[in-house]
Amino acid sequence: MKAIIRKRVLKTGIAVVGLSTLAVAVSAHAQQTLNIVSWGGAYSMSQHEAYDKPWMEKTGDEIVNIDRSGNALAGLRAQSQAGNVTWDLVDMLPADAMIACAEGLIEPLDHDELLADAPDGTPPSEDFVDGALGDCFVASIVYSNIVAFNSEMFPEDDQPSTIEDVFDLENYPGKRALLRKPINNMEWALIADGVERDEVYAMLETEEGVQRAFDKLDTIKDEVIWWEEGAQPPQLLADQEVAFASAYNGRIFNAMVTEDQPFEIIWDAQVFELDGWVVPTGKLDKVKDYLHFATDTQRLADQAQYISYGPARLSSSELVSTHAETGIEMTPHMPTYEPNFETALQKDDLFWADYNDELTQRFNAWLSQ
Amino acid sequence: MSEPPAAPLTTADGVPLKVSLRRTVRRSKIKALLLVAPLLAFLFIAFLMPLFEMLWRSVDNPEVSTHLSRTVSALEGWNGESLPDEATFAALAEDLREGQQERNLGLLSSRLNYEKSGMRSTISRTARRVGTLEPPYRESLIEVNNTWGELDTWKLIQREASPYTISYYLAAVDLQLSPDGEIVQVPEHMQIHATLFWRTLWMSAVITGLTLLLGFPVAFLLASLPARHSNLLMILVLLPFWTSLLVRTTTWIAILQSQGVLNDVMVALGVIADEARWQMIHNKMGTIIAMTHILLPFMILPLYSVMKTIPPSYMRAARSLGGKPFLSFRRVYFPLTIPGIAAGGILVFILSIGYYITPALVGGQSGRFITNYIAYHMQTSLNWGLAAAIASILLFVVIICYLVFNRLIGVDKVKLG
């Protein structure tokens, strides 16, 4: 496993210089309306607080949020085929961005020219974490797929702690809520079955590996409730309908902190991935100032006050402070926090770009057996 | 002696009556046509064009022939027994180089990836490095990605070079083309669509049967009660009909779920134990119950309109001729309601084959319909060709149902109210 997140010492003094150049860049700017597509819910709220509000204040632009990231690729394709692209900026996953980029639906980005330098002058290409800058993609967060459990459903002295426990019905009985897709489940099944993390994807390219993953999933199949919307797992856990639920870590964090739910996150074998911006073809001139602003060091650090997703910039992690509502320290809740990150697995976008169609069909056939 | 030729009848201004009549008729025809023109235009744009677009997409296969045009022509005459020659590899490199510059390899790689998993990254990785490749391309391409050294890859390209394909239709019924071009079943662990087609059909038939069973007595009551009572009953039938589909569906979730109203009542009454609550939703049962309820008015209304026209005196006559109640019903009344049963049946059946939201919400895994996979391929997998093929097959099923219906009952007998 490569150490993805490198620490960098921040020279605060230069932050001021960075901000003032930004102010110059922004001043020559006519008021406009930006249609920005994102995921909705707590995530859109965090973007709204951290990027949109200060941007609207600064420029007088109006920002319209559209919650369509779940089907963003289909939307981009349809708009482009109809010759009427109405979205100006889209938040999507890097795997989708790769496909959209290859189809020419989104703009290739010159990161060092378009994005802000770090406060200490480090160019963007060195300031973002590995894999954060794709041909047409710039990541804003690192988020993680984890399994969480309701701590009230297990004795205090015997709480689950590893991914193996999720597959262990004998010692940790109860229903499990899992995402109704092969993604993450296949990886976890293999890891729980004893496969080394760095061999997981190579294994999944073989018939034996896929069969092994399905065999492992078979052992818990009868106890699984399959979810499809990100809001479902915290709800199922809170209702004690399930003992374990796979989820996006930010959703569980919000339930834990703002709703005081007795949830715990199993950070073992977290599958982390990036999420960020793409620019639909022809919209670069319109949104490049906003993009420059929304991906700078301070904005990414600010977003972490509202949701426990790690900033994709190395220079931002030093600035991550406390939760805006409750004032708790955010750092230990980040997927990238050292103890949480020890056994993390990075989602292999190339693998899923190739095998998602096939494995999804197989997964659905397996489900309906 | 012959009669003088009769003078042609004319109107007051001397135009022959025949001509004048024809003019008037033509004018009123044009007026009528103009009146329906907006509707015709609407139907053409909103119904016929999308329909043809869908049928077109289910066989359209432009990706390989456009984006790998050089490779395709170099492959003409290739015998498929050993790897193609250097010229073909060079053509591939040229095609990929151009595609990378124009950034239009995405659809090509998706298309090939449907047939052979791994082609997406093969193409994107090769295209990324193709600018730096040196001849001989045969060696250098295979070195970049050894998929290019497999005979099956080239057979696939050769096969998909045709501008039309049946692979989407094959995939829609769990078949595929083997590398040698034979039609074979996909492996058992990949089969899903045929099961779903079958399930959609039999569950729709069950739903149609249930609506008939429940709707027939209601329609009979509606038709035979005095107007005062039947109007009230009619409102009870129509009220749910006017309620949003989503509301009715989610109400069933509230009633049937394991912590829902029905289970709570049964537990309170001691009929079932608290731990043994019935699973009535998120399975086939949920879909059948909710859809039967939602589609019930479509059965009741045609039945009612037919029953309303059956004079009560027929039944009285049958009774006075000595028929027992059931016999009179079976021999006299029931045969007269068949057009209504047929109309309601075909309506409910065709509607339920195409149902999508209700199975998605209450069907769980086992109560899903093929329509849910059309939505999946439209929105998530983005395999629009496959979505179009599945939808076209559904369309053909509906057309066949209609033809059978027309042959057996006759569409002209249908009354919808």
Image (tube, coloured by chain):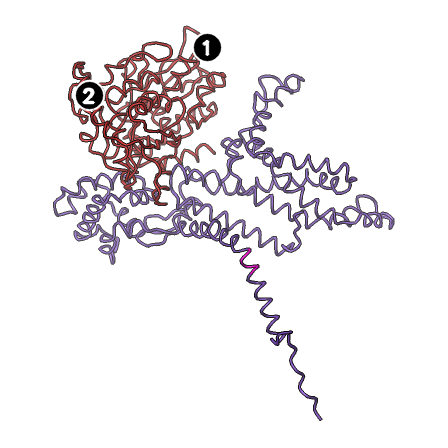
Chain colours: A red, B purple
Q: How crowded is mark 1: few (under 14 residues within 10 Å), some or many (20 or more)?
A: some
- A143 displayed left or right of B400: left
Q: Position of residue B126 (x, y in %)?
A: 21, 41
The chain that hosts pointer 2 is A
- B271 displayed left or right of A213: right
Q: Where is residue A236 in the image (x, y as percent from the top left)?
A: 47, 20
Q: Residue at x 27, y 21 (%)?
A: A299
Please give the residue where the numbered disc 1 appears in the rendered image.
A152
Give the CA separation, mark 1 to mark 2: 51 Å
The three-letter code of the residue at mark 2 reads Ser
> Is residue B33 shown in magenta?
yes
| Front label number (1 vs 2) | 2
**In what element is the residue under mark 1?**
helix
Q: Bounds of the magenta span?
A: B31-35
* Residue B292: mark: none
**In what element is the residue under mark 2?**
helix
* Sequence order check, earlier mark of 1 and 2: 2
The three-letter code of the residue at mark 1 reads Glu
Magenta highlight: main SS: helix
Looking at the image, which is closer to me, B190 or A298? A298
Please give the residue where the numbered disc 2 appears in the rendered image.
A20
- A352 displayed left or right of B85: right
Q: Position of residue B52 (x, y in %)?
A: 44, 52
> Is residue A334 shown in magenta?
no
Looking at the image, which is closer to me, B139 or B406? B406
The chain that hosts pointer 1 is A
Q: Is residue B275 visible?
A: yes
* Above or below for B28 versus A307: below
